[in-house]
Image (spheres, rainbow, N blue to C red):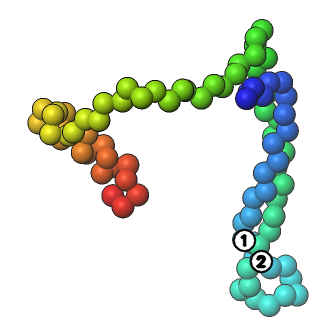
Amino acid sequence: RTLTSGSRLLTLWTSFFSTTTAGASLGRRTPQMQKLVLQVDFPSPAFDIVYKAPEATGNITPLSMETLDKEARTRLLSLITRHSPSG
């Protein structure tokens, strides 16, 4: 797949709540929509940038956490728990 280049328009819709106008019931909040259009300028390189998925190789050696030293194991576990959905 080739990545994009040149200028592109990006449209975003935001929603926010505002108080109602005069004549409506007091204290009622209504959702308002606002459209934002951004122009994004991607660089145009002299050559195409192509994404190529890595090829699967059969030489993967499974490793165990027990083979790590204590400091490396502690750091790895702290990173895993910090970035886990339940942690």
Q: Closest to the observer: 43 or 23?
A: 43
Q: Is residue 23 left or right of residue 63?
A: right
The mark nearer the N terminus, 1 or 2, is 1
- In the displayed image of the protein, which residue is found farthest to the left? 70
The image position of residue 82, as x and y in percent, is 33, 49
On the rendered image, what quadrant is the C terminus found in? bottom left
Q: Real-space Cα distance between discs 1 and 2?
A: 6 Å
- For the point 76% across and 88% down, the residue is 26
The image position of residue 45, as x and y in percent, is 75, 13
- In the displayed image of the protein, which residue is found farthest to the front? 58
On the rendered image, what quadrant is the N terminus found in? top right
- In the displayed image of the protein, which residue is found farthest to the bottom? 25
- For the point 15% across and 34% down, the residue is 67
Residue 42 in view here: no
- For the point 78% across and 51% down, the residue is 12
SS of the residue at dot 2? strand
Q: Residues within 10 Å of mark 2 (few under 14, many from 20)?
A: few
Residue on which disc 1 sits? 17
Q: Closest to the observer: 16 or 26?
A: 16
Residue 32 sits in quarter: bottom right
Residue on which disc 2 sits? 30
Q: Closest to the observer: 37 or 72?
A: 72
The image position of residue 48, as x and y in percent, is 75, 16
- For the point 20% across and 40% down, the residue is 65
Q: Is residue 24 left or right of residue 82?
A: right
The image position of residue 4, as x and y in percent, is 78, 28
| Pointer 1 with pointer 2, Cβ within 8 A | yes
In this rendering, the answer to whether 23 lies above or below 13 is below
